[in-house]
Amino acid sequence: MTSRSDQPMLVATDIHRHFEGMHAVDGVTIEVAPGKITGLIGPNGAGKSTFMAVLAGTLPSTSGTIVFDGKDITRLPAYRRARLGLVRTFQLPSEFARLTVLENLLVAAQHNRGDSLFGALMGKRYWIEDERKLVQQARTLLKRFGMTAKESDYAGTMSGGQKRLIEIMRALMLQPRLLLLDEPMSGVHPKIVQEIQYYLQDLRHEGLTILMVEHELHMVERLCDTVVVMAQGKVIGSGTMSSLRKQQEIVDAYLVG
Amino acid sequence: MNSYYAINLLIYAGVDIIACLALNLQFGVAGIVNFSFIVFQAVGAYTAAVLSMPPDTAPDYSFQIYVGGLQLPFPIPWIGGAIAGGLLAVPVGFVVLRKLRSDYQAIALLVLSVIANTVITNARPFLNGAAGLALVPAPLADLFDPATYGYFYVGLTAVCTALVALVAFRIVNSPYGRTLRAMREHEVAATAIGKNPVALKMTIFIVGGVIAGLSGGILTGYITFWAPSVWLYPETIILFAAVIVGGRGNNLGAVLGALLVPVGFEEVTRFIPSSIGPPGLIPALQWVAIGLLIIGFLWFRPEGVRPEPRRVFEGAPD
């Protein structure tokens, strides 16, 4: 999960995303430092989620380049980016509802001999070893996130907060190098918000790089090393939260209150 | 019950089970609403027919016109039928499965089914048009006494059914099947964890096409006939009813559905005296009943008689 060099984990340069003349993302350039939590904040409609979707490849960019860990990924489809370790979560719950919690984690694993038509047709004996290892790996995660007791329940029956945790655990099963979190705390019970905060700090200490969109500024202040402020599709400032609070135009644009 | 009727029933059951297992892979597991399923069965049937029939210039066959007529020995026609089903899935999948949203995929496939049937009905030189192909040779018929041939055919069908069931069970119970289910549940999220939905859909579309093609080969070898009237689009609806009633995503459900709907339901209504009401009333009511069956199940028991099982792993906490 760690990156040895000090070069940025991700560099997005002059990203544009236009919807029929509407400039949702209008020339955004950011760098994400390895091993840090970078926050992306801004008012509703600033283009944060669109930008995240462009980074993950869910939406194509109109123009601009994205370099992930030294590799130009601008033209790669979303699934290829995920396989490289650039993994996103969603603003809305996106669990696989009719899969159990454990299955939601297992399905995200990258290396399983049974996860191809050929492997499946070869029969259980061909892939059971891989599967056993992954079940262990998934159970370790479930234990860490306090969801061991839920492993055999359908993910669709979980609460909003538990679905968030499932999504984060699912992303971790890919052994990501950069986690893109789109409002991981939205619609989550305050108790679980605390938990998620704790988990994210923990992951950061292990060296995982995180870029997160978040509305709750106290949370951003506690979690994020660097914060990027977006408004109307553009970056209007970046730095630590305390330095941002001193810049009048940013305060006017967003930080009031 | 005479043995002819029993043999008939068993072979139809086998063909319907094979078809339902394939449709369950596509629709129940992977979530592809393949409303043109019957076209894949038809393409397998036609291919198997023209591969096994003599050329249309042969004395007994000169009343029909068709391409092929290669007179190939069994099992090549059946294998050819299966391959044809798979090959057809490539261009169809390429057009339908890549860009369209799933509801539009369903519409496009339904339209394809109607167009294909209309074209084959009217383009007579290709596959003898509306009259269809008759006198399709029954596989290995000359090796058997006509009295025992039916039993042989039941065995042949059973072997194919077992083979298809093995494939279906292995897919559904594997990590690959889990990936297909994840895609069915949330395609964008599946992409975000590194799954390529287009490749996954194409693959299972082709697998389903191969199996459907095989089912067509089996059917046409038994009834020795194939024509546009036997693969009208409502035939697909019957198979959908079977998978929904049996239990989407559950192989045993698909088998059960095949026995309950295409076999059971149609056989039961066969015994309603046709003298009731005006001519054609009973067959028409059959369609009404199939519709009600689908609506009833989707309303009251959407998971079907045998729901998709919840997977509990070894060593799970109670």
Image (spheres, coloured by chain):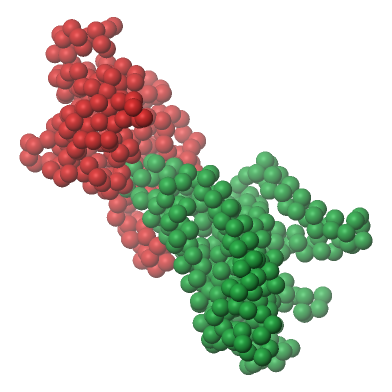
Query: What residue is at 75 percent from the left and 59 percent from the top?
Result: B265
The quadrant where residue B134 appears: bottom right
Q: Quadrant of the N terminus of chain B?
A: bottom right
Residue A2, above or below B242: above
Relative to B100, is A6 above or below?
above
Q: Position of residue A93 (x, y in %)?
A: 42, 33
Residue B248 percent across, percent down from the top left: 57, 52
Residues B234 and A20: in front is A20
Question: Residue A33 location, x and y as percent?
Answer: 14, 32
Q: Colour of chain A?
A: red
Left or right? Give the position of A172 relative to B166.
left
Q: Is residue B297 visible?
A: yes
Judging depth in this view, the residue of A177 and B40 nearest the camera is B40
Q: Residue at x 25, y 26 (%)?
A: A26
Q: Residue at 25% of width from left, 31% of height from top?
A: A16
- Of residues B261 and B103, the one nearer the viewer is B103
Residue A185 picture quarter = top left
Q: Position of residue B101 (x, y in %)?
A: 47, 44
Q: Is residue B204 among the parts visible in the rendering?
A: no
Q: Colour of chain B?
A: green
Q: Is residue A85 above or below residue A42?
A: below
From the viewer's perspective, tell me whether residue A165 is left or right of residue A100. left
